[in-house]
Amino acid sequence: MSSTDLNGPAIAPTSAEQSDATTEPGRHAQIIVIGGGLAGVAAAVRFRREGWHDFLVLERADAVGGTWRDNTYPGAACDVPSHLYSYSFAPNPNWTRSFSGQREIQDYITKVARRYRVHDKHVFGCEVLSASWHEDAARWRLETTKGTFTADVLVGAFGALCEPSLPDIPGIETFEGQVFHSARWDHQAQLAGRKVAVIGTGASAVQIVPAIAEQVDELRVFQRTAPWVLPRLDRRYSALDRLACRFVPYYQRLLRSGIYWAHEAQAVGLAKAPLAMKPLGIIARAKLRREVPDADLRRRLTPGYRIGCKRILLSNTYYPAFRHEHVQLVTEGISEVRADCLVTADGAVHQADTIVLATGFQVTDSPTYRRIFGKDGRSLGEVFDKAGRQCYKGTAIANFPNMFLMVGPNTGLGHNSMIFMIESQVNYLADAIATMRRRRIRSVEVRQESQEDFSRMLQRKLSRSVWNTGGCSSWYLDKHGANTTMWPGFSHEFRRITRKFDIDAYHVSTRGPV
Ligand SMILES: Cc1cc2nc3c(=O)[nH]c(=O)nc-3n(C[C@H](O)[C@H](O)[C@H](O)COP(=O)(O)OP(=O)(O)OC[C@H]3O[C@@H](n4cnc5c(N)ncnc54)[C@H](O)[C@@H]3O)c2cc1C
């Protein structure tokens, strides 16, 4: 794929940009973004398009991409079709299949960052250790592994599915083989001829298990809760498909819209009327019957909660992987790990020389929450501990002036592309910054009452959703049992409420920079 394949205007450097190009520590920038994943890159492109050049993206790793840079496990691919799971401003006619693999998505993000000239706005290898608001100066001060930076506006794009969640299993530190998390895949680890244990049966595990099943000697899959699995309507795109995307007017746009609306319809069952999920349950059960002939195995693979309550997984190869004799499903809980084995609650010993932790992420308690300090000196983590993860429109939080979160609380989707949500948030924060510039506003801070009203409205809607009523426990719920992860409705409703910066919901202090 050449850079010209990403439709949309390239952004040429300007003289203003040259003067703001330094990424040296100690530097003040009008806007600092933490994190160079899909959200950070989207925000940066928007700033460029608005003609704002005085911004930086601080990224702890050495490349853009976030999720798609880190999740290099065998079989890693998106589960929303690529023609939708891509930026609206950078359609890619060259996707090779409906659900592209990790490498292709990572290449796409890198090319977008270069084409829109935001790559050079990143400070790589720069981990934000703390960010604190200084009211007198109306600025954020950031301490990083590359020194101090200050900013008028802070954008937190540090990801929701970014920090691996590691299980606390007694004895795991005594294991003498290799142990690694799915998002930190050890590519030096030899799997051929090995006894491998995969812990977890979520979205990553269902991709990993079939991808490694044929290489390994023995594979044990440790399941706590069975997932619902639907067919993956994946296909390789032909040269003709790609030519049509590139040259037939509106073809790619129509394709994207079709995929969007087909996915959007699922919000009815997930968020509004869980009974509407029934047909999907019937399809999933039929698939299970067809692909798992063994009645006992099928029983253990059958979920005991309503479809949609946990993330619905898409795979045509997960169930068939269990047809191999050397692939076994273990449903007893793991009680202990020893030097060379895992022991389950029934006393069974499972020999292993490699453990793959497909155990998900610290979604509701990101470590970065504990590094961001608001007006009264409390960290975001402390504020969330006390009041729950309340957040206005998934973006603004009382006590944290001039700060906008990307992919914040209650922006998660079970049915559509997160990039749609990200672009909605980018609209909102760009309008906020434009308003601040136009009206010479020093700081904006969402009003506590606006935030509380918004949270109440969300929780009221969520109480009807399948995530709250479907009879499962999932990472959608925080430690207080509240669903502070999912957006309770259609994604276009979120687009509507983030179209304009609603200044009346904010305390505003005028005069000063920005
Ligand atoms: C395996 C996997 C598959 C997925 N598939 C899909 C899919 O098909 N469809 C979909 O809609 N969503 C999918 N998602 C969700 C996905 O996370 C989002 O779609 C999207 O990639 C989130 O982008 P982000 O920029 O918000 O976060 P991330 O991609 O997580 O990026 C955050 C960035 O912030 C950096 N960072 C974090 N803390 C700091 C710090 N303190 N200092 C400096 N930098 C920091 C990180 O290094 C990272 O680069 C998937 C997630 C995973 C894990």
Image (spheres, rainbow, N blue to C red):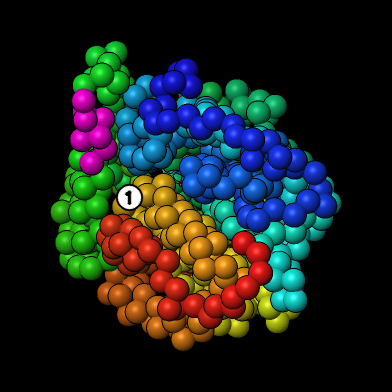
| Residue sitting at x 44%, y 21% | 4
User: Which residue in the rendered view is the most extreme toward the top?
Assistant: 239
The image quadrant where one finds the N terminus is top left
Mark 1 lies on a secondary structure that is loop
- Give the quarter of the image for residue 279: bottom left
Q: Is mark 1 within 8 Å of ligand 1?
A: yes
> Residue drawn 70% across and 53% down?
29
**Residue type at the position of mark 1:** Asn
Q: Whole-percent x and y of residue 406? A: 52, 57
Q: Residue at x 26, y 30 (%)?
A: 252
Residue nearest the observer in this picture, 299 or 514: 514
Visible residue check, residue 175: no
Query: From the viewer's perspective, is residue 375 above or below residue 163?
Result: below
Q: Which residue is mark 1?
A: 416
Residue 298 higher or lower than 366, as above or below: above
Number of marks drawn:
1
Q: Position of residue 214 (x, y in %)?
A: 48, 24
Secondary structure, magenta segment, majority class: helix
Residue 399: give x, y in percent of width and height: 61, 78
- Front residue (pair 368, 434): 434
> In the image, is residue 99 part of the stretch drawn in magenta?
no
Q: Is residue 395 above or below residue 183?
A: below
Q: For the magenta stretch, what is the residue range? A: 249-257
Q: Quadrant of residue 367?
A: bottom right
In what quadrant of the picture does the C terminus appear? bottom right
Q: Nearer the viewer, residue 263 or 149?
A: 149
Is 446 displayed left or right of 513 in the figure?
A: left
Residue at 38% x, 63% y is 500
Residue 60, visible in the rendered structure? yes
Q: Is residue 32 left or right of residue 43?
A: right
Estimate how packed mark 1 is, as few (under 14), some (14 to 19) or many (20 or more) residues with alpha carbons within 10 Å. many
At which x and y percent is residue 434?
49, 59
